[in-house]
């Protein structure tokens, strides 16, 4: 899918450059609300690696895959929509799929236990005249709540086949595939008020030929859907466009409320009638241990111990098991004693050129430093983090966490939903920057990107930092946390004052807590790891190569000396630390591991460790994040942030050093 | 005149109109003002609320309430809330009010800030 325009008011819509067409003509699009299991169903239909998640936004990088049943057909997993007309960036991506891609069939994935909400979307999709199937997913949860639906009757009302499914168990999927093979366009129609019907007929008659029914396009146009407006701006000539605008204006002025509200009222009334007719039993709601745990998780008092348990689990799994046990095993035992000596010996024998040998396996060797760091140090930490985060995501805990943390984020001018990218930032800031699309307003996204770049340590760095501070004392870790959080809040509060725009209030669905499907977590982790390694390894190797070259031509010692006044004078660290900061720009974890190595060689005092850790945490985002920020927002912003953050980090580090030293704190 | 930031729809700012308020009060006293979200004063400040109507933020956890309408919210926000299931006439159950408001709508749980909840007008259902 082509990148989503940053300025979605632009008149030229981009037709996706990878609009792969199926041999039978058209793809299968999975459409639906967030949290209904679209991604799980996508995986069932395609058997491909895909990021599966419980909260909206992770699948913004739209997934495409060949259908298992028919490799010629492409299946699309669209971002979740809360309402159509599309307002948020995610929703607009889905609207684009509907309007631009040649579709053979739309599969709406709906939450069976929330029929009315599902139907509100169904009626809009059915009006589009594209062949459609409704998959009523999560039937198991509906059953356990006592919800019973007459699917035949529903199918008759909508003129769309209805298939009950439980995507996580694979139930109903075969039937869904069979039904999707024989698509038929629905003959569904809602009758609106008379003036609206007249306008719809008039507009529909003059619209250019579109992938969706003229009536549906006219409805989108009248609701001021931005994607429809762009499409018409491209496909209708100027006089026609002006005519359409005038007609819309005329219709709007005859009504009290906005057209999209009027449509919504009509649709809601319709949906209510259908729901009353087809709901045999509307259910008694969730009961039991899981529901109680869910309520506990958002309780103002009991929520905190639940959070504590989750955090401690994360800390233990990533910080102690990952960064401690696994890294120790890999670095010291596997690489240190087995692999590296063997590789060194082999390379020395095979290559006659000493410089080349040095380049590969010397002190700053591509293998001995670059690859070893990447595989022995970073890989175990990142793997454990992604596994833990995958479990958290799939369990449905994160939206509940956003309820608990909302007050806290208010101080920073955000709402609790920011907790999602912030927590993911603890895994990888680059990935988290992409996830900021979850947030509703541009202002929120900008603010979170700034805070991510400044104060959130990514997992490998975090693992190393916690490992180093933990080996000193708990107090050291507390000081680090206090300073970093302090900076986070201060900057957030300030930036919120400065940035234009209203704060968006918290409004989020709380899906029921679910036991994560281990296979999903593993698949997600593998997909994330693949992405991560493709990013990390080349950069580590590049960084090592650069450092090697710098050292050979004698520039490295010069650079280190150049950085000395700052690093030694201001921060009070040994001169070698400046190379760690240099590397830290390339990859934050690379810099942290440089310091880790220095400490294990006894070169850093406890005070120096704390100062170094704080500075490196606040330090500029790594090159990859800067690129992503430049791509997501603008190059100017990316450069601006880097230029501001660099001195800020050093300033805080130096102040901390003076502060702690003056208190006589050595520990 | 006020202008909707989303669709540019212009309308008269009724909350600033003394006469509109006097009229509203007269009508509601006479029982002639419908409690539903229809009508021109639906999305502006109504100083006098008919009996039994309060905001979602004021409902005790565990109680049920029927959605009546919204006040001081943009049309886009109202559409969003309705899309989540908070439609006029729908009965919801309040799960908690602190740290934020959470309600059960049909079979889904929805969390909203107190600021938003205080703009959703409901009537308590015994």
Image: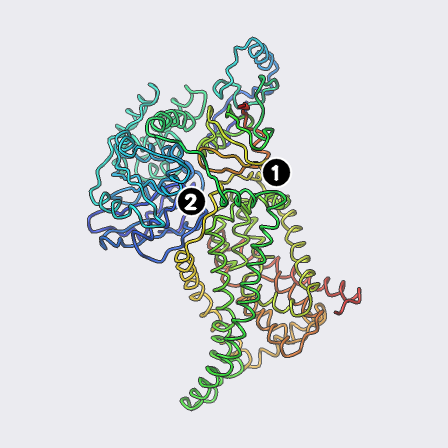
Which of these two is toward me, B124 or A480?
B124
Q: Is residue A17 visible?
A: yes
Look at mark 1 in the image and give the residue it sits on.
Answer: B98
At numbered mark 2, what does the secondary structure look like: helix, strand or loop? loop
Q: Quadrant of residue A125?
A: top left
Query: Compared with residue A487, is residue B38 higher up or lower down, i.e. above or below?
Result: above
Q: Is residue A415 visible?
A: no
User: Residue A4, how many percent across, how many down?
Assistant: 41, 48
Query: Compared with residue A419, is residue A595 higher up or lower down, i.e. above or below?
Result: below
At numbered mark 1, what does the secondary structure look like: helix, strand or loop? loop
Please give the count of numbered marks on the rendered protein: 2
Q: Quadrant of residue A269?
A: top left
The CA distance from mark 1 to mark 2 is 24 Å
Determine whether label 1 and label 2 are within 8 Å by CB: no
The residue that appears at 51% across and 23% down in the rendered structure is B68
The C terminus of chain A lies in which quarter of the figure?
bottom right
- Direction from residue A353 to residue B116 in the image, left or right: right
In which chain is the residue bearing label 2? A
The residue that appears at 50% across and 26% down in the rendered structure is B67
Farthest residue, direction top: B30
Q: What colour scheme does the image use?
A: rainbow
User: Residue A521, how many percent across, how many down?
Assistant: 42, 57
User: Residue A199, how many percent across, how many down?
Assistant: 32, 23
In which chain is the residue bearing label 1? B
The residue that appears at 72% across and 62% down in the rendered structure is A656
Query: Compared with residue A602, is residue A124 higher up or lower down, i.e. above or below?
Result: above
Query: Of the residues tagged 1 and 2, which is closer to the observer?
Result: 1
User: In the drawing, what numbered circle is on residue A35?
Assistant: 2
User: In the drawing, what numbered circle is on residue A318?
Assistant: none
User: Residue A300, how many percent across, how many down?
Assistant: 62, 43
């Amino acid at each position: 899918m082509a990148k989503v325009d940053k300025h979605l008011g632009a008149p030229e819509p981009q037709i996706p450059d990878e609009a792969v067409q199926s041999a039978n003509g058209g793809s299968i699009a999975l459409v639906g609300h967030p949290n209904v299991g679209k991604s799980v169903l996508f995986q069932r239909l395609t058997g491909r690696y895909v990021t599966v998640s419980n909260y909206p936004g992770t699948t913004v990088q739209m997934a495409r895959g060949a259908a298992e049943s028919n490799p010629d057909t492409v299946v699309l997993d669209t971002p979740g929509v809360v309402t159509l007309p599309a307002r948020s960036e995610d929703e607009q991506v889905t609207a684009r799929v509907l309007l631009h891609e040649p579709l053979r069939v739309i599969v709406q994935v709906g939450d069976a236990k929330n029929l009315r909400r599902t139907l509100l979307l169904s009626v809009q999709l059915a009006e589009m005249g594209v062949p459609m199937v409704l998959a009523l997913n999560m039937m198991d949860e509906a059953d356990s709540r006592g919800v019973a639906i007459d699917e035949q009757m529903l199918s008759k009302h909508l003129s769309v086949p209805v298939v009950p499914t439980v995507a996580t168990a694979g139930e109903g999927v075969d039937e869904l595939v069979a039904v999707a093979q024989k698509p038929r366009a629905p003959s569904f129609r809602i009758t609106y008020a008379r003036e609206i019907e007249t306008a719809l007929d008039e507009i529909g008659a003059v619209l250019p030929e579109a992938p969706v029914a003229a009536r549906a396009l006219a409805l989108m146009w009248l609701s001021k859907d931005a994607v429809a407006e762009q499409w018409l701006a491209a496909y209708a000539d100027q006089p026609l466009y002006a005519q359409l605008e005038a007609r819309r204006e005329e219709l709007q002025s005859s009504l009290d409320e906005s057209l999209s509200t009027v449509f919504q009222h009509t649709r809601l009334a319709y949906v209510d009638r259908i729901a009353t007719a087809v709901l045999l039993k509307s259910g008694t709601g969730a009961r039991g241990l899981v529901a109680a745990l869910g309520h506990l998780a958002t309780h103002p008092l009991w929520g905190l111990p639940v959070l504590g348990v989750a955090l401690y689990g994360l800390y233990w799994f990533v910080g102690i098991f990952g960064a401690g046990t696994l890294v120790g095993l890999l670095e010291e035992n596997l690489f240190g004693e087995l692999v590296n000596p063997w590789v060194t010996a082999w390379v020395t024998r095979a290559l006659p050129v000493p410089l080349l040998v040095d380049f590969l396996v010397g002190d700053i060797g591509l293998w001995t430093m670059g690859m070893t760091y990447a595989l022995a140090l970073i890989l175990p930490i990142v793997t454990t983090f992604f596994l833990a985060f995958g479990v958290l995501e799939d369990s449905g805990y994160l939206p509940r966490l956003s309820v608990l943390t909302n007050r806290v984020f208010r101080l920073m001018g955000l709402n609790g939903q920011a907790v999602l990218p912030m927590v993911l930032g603890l895994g990888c800031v680059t990935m988290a920057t992409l996830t900021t699309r979850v947030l509703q307003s541009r202002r929120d996204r900008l603010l979170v990107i700034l805070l991510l770049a400044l104060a959130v340590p990514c997992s490998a760095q975090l693992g190393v930092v916690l490992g180093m501070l933990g080996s000193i004392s708990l107090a050291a870790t507390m000081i680090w946390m206090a300073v970093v959080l302090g900076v986070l809040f201060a900057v957030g509060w300030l930036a919120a004052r400065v940035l234009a725009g209203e704060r968006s209030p918290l409004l989020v669905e709380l899906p029921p807590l679910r036991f994560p499907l281990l296979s999903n977590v593993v698949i997600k982790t593998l997909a994330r790891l693949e992405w991560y390694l493709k990013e990390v390894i080349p950069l580590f190797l590049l960084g090592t190569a650069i450092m090697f070259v710098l050292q050979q031509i004698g520039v490295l010692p010069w650079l280190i000396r150049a950085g000395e006044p700052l690093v030694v004078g201001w921060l009070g660290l040994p001169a070698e630390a400046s190379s760690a900061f240099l590397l830290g720009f390339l990859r934050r974890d690379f810099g942290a591991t440089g310091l880790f190595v220095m400490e294990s060689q006894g070169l850093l005092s406890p005070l120096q460790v704390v100062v170094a850790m704080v500075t490196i945490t606040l330090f500029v985002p790594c090159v990859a994040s800067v690129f992503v920020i430049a791509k997501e927002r603008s190059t100017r912003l990316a450069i601006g942030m880097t230029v501001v953050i660099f001195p800020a980090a050093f300033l805080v580090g130096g102040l901390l050093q003076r502060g702690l030293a003056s208190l006589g704190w050595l520990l | 005149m006020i202008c909707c930031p989303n669709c540019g729809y212009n309308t008269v700012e009724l909350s600033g109109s003394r006469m509109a308020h006097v009229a509203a009060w007269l009508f509601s006293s006479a029982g002639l003002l419908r409690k539903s979200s229809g009508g021109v004063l639906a999305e502006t400040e109504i100083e006098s609320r008919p009996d039994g109507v309060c905001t979602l933020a004021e409902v005790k956890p565990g109680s049920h309430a029927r959605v009546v309408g919204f006040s001081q919210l943009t049309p886009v926000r109202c559409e969003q809330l309705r899309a989540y299931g908070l439609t006029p006439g729908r009965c919801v159950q309040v799960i908690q009010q602190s740290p934020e408001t959470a309600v059960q709508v049909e079979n889904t749980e929805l969390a909203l800030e107190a600021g938003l909840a205080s703009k959703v007008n409901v009537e308590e259902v015994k």
